[in-house]
Each structure stands twice: as C-alpha cells, then as structure tokens.
C-alpha cells in the first residue's frame, strides 16, 4: 500500500485534473432515462458495456465500458473532459452540456450494471506485472492501487478505477497515451510515471490480462 500513500502525499498541480471527485449520490432509475436522453448509450452501450458498438470501421473497444465502474472516478473524468484536463473531442462536447447532478444519476445507473467482459486468452507477463510489478524496472504492482481483482477502489479523495473487464483496445490506448504524455490527468502524474516504464509488449500483455479479469 506504499504506492497509495505516494499518490496521496503528492501535491496535485492545476493541470493534472480536478480533485474532490466524491460526494454526489446519484439515482440509478433517473440515470437510466438520462443516459438515453443525453445519448450516452449510443457510444457506451445500453447497459454501459459497449459490447456491440463499432467505431465505424468494424472495431469494438474504442468506447470504454462504464458498467460497474466507480461513480467517483467517472465524475472526475467528466469534470476533466469539461475543463480540458483530459482531451477527447466527443467527450468534450458531451461533458460541456451535462451538469454534475445528471452525471451523478447516469453514473449511478452504469455502476449498477454488471460488466460483461470476455476472456482474452492467457497473458502470463501481464499477470506478473499486474500482481507483482517489476521492482528492477521501477514498475509498481498495479494491484496495489487498482485492487487484487482489478475491481478498483476509493481511498479518501482518490479514485482508482476498475480495470477488470475493460475493453482491451481501450486499455491499450490509455496506457500508450499515459506513456506519451497525451493523457495527463492522474493525481501527481502517477500514471505517466508508471507507463513510461512499460514497453509495447508490456502494455499489450497488461491490457489482455485486465480485460480477461
Ligand atoms: C460519440 C460517442 C460518445 C458519446 C455519445 C459519449 N461518449 Fe463517453 N466516451 C467516448 C469515447 C471515445 C471515450 C474514450 C476517450 C478516450 O479514448 O480517451 C469516452 C469516455 C468516457 C468516460 C471516461 C471513461 C473512463 O474509463 O475513463 C466517461 C466517464 C464517459 N465517456 C461518459 C459519457 C457520458 C456520461 C455520456 C453521455 C452524456 C457519454 N460519455 C457519451 C465516446 C462517447
Ligand atoms: C499508485 C497508484 C497506481 C498504480 C500503482 C497504478 N495505477 Fe493506474 N491509475 C491510478 C489512478 C489514480 C488512475 C486514475 C487517474 C485519473 O484520475 O484519471 C489510474 C488510471 C489508470 C487507467 C485508466 C483507466 C480508464 O478507465 O481510463 C489505466 C488503464 C491504468 N490506470 C492502468 C494501470 C496499470 C496497467 C498499472 C500497473 C502497471 C497501474 N495502472 C498502476 C493509480 C495507479
């Protein structure tokens, strides 16, 4: 758990995303209707699993699963898309027109849905890095923050997202963007520091492992 203490102890710069992601209690029943009205389901799927939603060229996995995800983490992301701390053209437009109250309801709905992942084959290197890290290369165990089973957790103000069952393609893209510094909204830049130690093969294996959890 030393890794968590590191995150909490690190000062958060203004450009690194909003803190204080907690404290909205959403209503899942209202949230289901709002997710339809606000068209979230067109990309994230009816139940938040984005299982059959293609990107226009036949690929699935561009749109992240929101099902089973921590609402506090999703709320932070909406605020970060809105402020520009996290960049994505579609999500900037969506977040700008969505208030925090409606977002809280929508995330309560998605959180109440079961994540429907597919097993993606064995990934022994991914598993080793996830569970143990690699001290010689300065890679901490992902499990120390994201949970043994990849279920995510909330510790004080910090939200560590669920990774278990997330689309492999989406996870690969996020890790590559953390590594390249294109995504910079983690507290204290912790995910950038970690991803810089990962090779393409590490990223591929980690994404395969968590997708199958
Ligand atoms: C036009 C397609 C589209 C629509 C409509 C859309 N999204 Fe997204 N959303 C995306 C994409 C693409 C990403 C991933 C961005 C990336 O790759 O960094 C995303 C990411 C997210 C994330 C971050 C998830 C994570 O794991 O970090 C949240 C939260 C989110 N969307 C919420 C919503 C909500 C709420 C709505 C409805 C108001 C919505 N989205 C509508 C395309 C869309
Ligand atoms: C010290 C704690 C910590 C460790 C260790 C850690 N992470 Fe993270 N990770 C975070 C935090 C905090 C976030 C959320 C950042 C934000 O607010 O946008 C995050 C976000 C992510 C995301 C984005 C999820 C999404 O839905 O967009 C991925 C993917 C990820 N981490 C993968 C990993 C992998 C793989 C490892 C191990 C190599 C790892 N993390 C180790 C703290 C950690």
Image: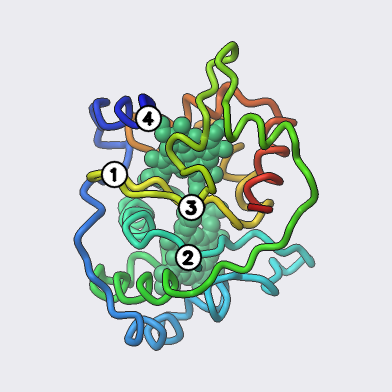
**Alpha carbons under labels 4 and 1: distance apart:** 11 Å
Q: Nearer the viewer, residue 210 or 84?
A: 210
Of label 3 and label 4, which has the lower sequence position? Answer: 4
**Alpha carbons under labels 3 and 1: distance apart:** 13 Å
Q: How is the image coloured?
A: rainbow
Q: Is residue 140 left or right of residue 102?
A: right
Is residue 178 visible from the viewing direction of this image?
Answer: no
The residue at which mark 2 appears reads as 68
x, y percentage for residue 88? 49, 54
Q: Which mark is residue 99?
A: none
Of label 4 and label 2, which has the lower sequence position? Answer: 4
Which residue is depicted at the point 49% across and 74% down?
A: 113
Secondary structure type for disc 1: strand
Assess disc 1: are there few (<14), some (14-19) or many (≥20) residues with their C-alpha within 10 Å of its C-alpha: few
Q: Which mark is residue 151?
A: 3
The residue at which mark 4 appears reads as 1
Q: Is residue 39 left or right of residue 164?
A: left
Which residue is depicted at the point 71% across and 46% down?
A: 208
Secondary structure type for disc 2: loop
Q: Which mark is residue 155?
A: 1
């Amino acid at each position: 758990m030393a890794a968590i203490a590191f995150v909490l102890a690190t000062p958060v710069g203004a450009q690194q995303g909003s803190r204080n992601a907690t404290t909205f209690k959403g209503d899942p029943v209202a949230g289901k209707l709002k997710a339809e009205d606000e068209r979230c389901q067109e990309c994230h799927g009816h139940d938040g699993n984005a299982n059959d939603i293609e990107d226009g060229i036949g690929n699935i996995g561009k749109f992240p699963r929101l099902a089973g995800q921590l609402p506090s983490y999703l709320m932070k992301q909406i605020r970060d898309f809105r402020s520009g701390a996290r960049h994505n053209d579609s999500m900037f437009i969506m977040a700008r027109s969505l208030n925090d109250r409606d977002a809280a309801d929508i995330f309560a709905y998605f959180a109440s849905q079961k994540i429907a992942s597919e097993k993606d084959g064995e990934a022994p290197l991914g598993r080793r890095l996830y569970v143990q890290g690699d001290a010689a290369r300065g890679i901490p165990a992902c499990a120390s923050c994201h949970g043994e089973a990849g279920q995510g957790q909330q510790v004080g103000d910090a939200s560590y997202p669920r990774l278990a069952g997330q689309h492999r393609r989406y996870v690969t893209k996020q890790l590559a963007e953390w590594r390249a510094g294109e995504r910079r909204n983690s507290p204290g830049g912790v995910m950038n520091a970690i991803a810089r130690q990962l090779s393409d093969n590490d990223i591929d294996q980690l994404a395969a492992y968590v997708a199958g959890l």
